Amino acid sequence: MWPREYAARILELRTKEERQQALSEVPAELRELVKKHVQIAWNHPIRKKQQ
């Protein structure tokens, strides 16, 4: 699975605990990159408009 696919699945989860658990299950060599993808998506201006 690609890092952005991991990030997309993590972003679909409802709670912070679920997201943290899913991130911990990402392979170690991809974890920081996936975390960065999640942070960028979470803080994107379009997401803030949808709230």
Image: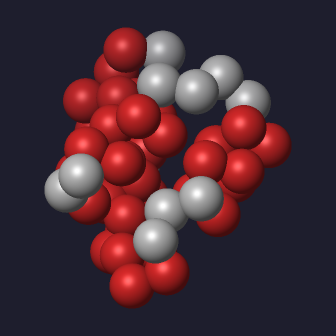
The residue positioned 41% from the left and 34% from the top of the image is: 9
Percent across and percent down for residue 5 are 25, 44
Determine whether, in the image, residue 35 is placed left or right of residue 33.
right
Give the colouring mode of the picture: secondary structure
Q: Is residue 41 in view from this perspective?
A: no
Percent across and percent down for residue 39 are 43, 58
- Of 10 and 42, the residue lying toward us: 10
Percent across and percent down for residue 1 are 24, 52
- Of 30 and 15, the residue lying toward us: 30
The residue positioned 65% from the left and 23% from the top of the image is: 14
- Examine the rendered structure and indicate whether residue 19 appears above or below residue 2: above
- Taking the view exactly as shown, the residue that stands out farthest to the bottom is 29
- Of 42 and 24, the residue lying toward us: 24
The residue positioned 36% from the left and 48% from the top of the image is: 7
The residue positioned 36% from the left and 75% from the top of the image is: 30
Determine whether, in the image, residue 31 is placed left or right of residue 4.
right
Q: Is residue 29 in view from this perspective?
A: yes
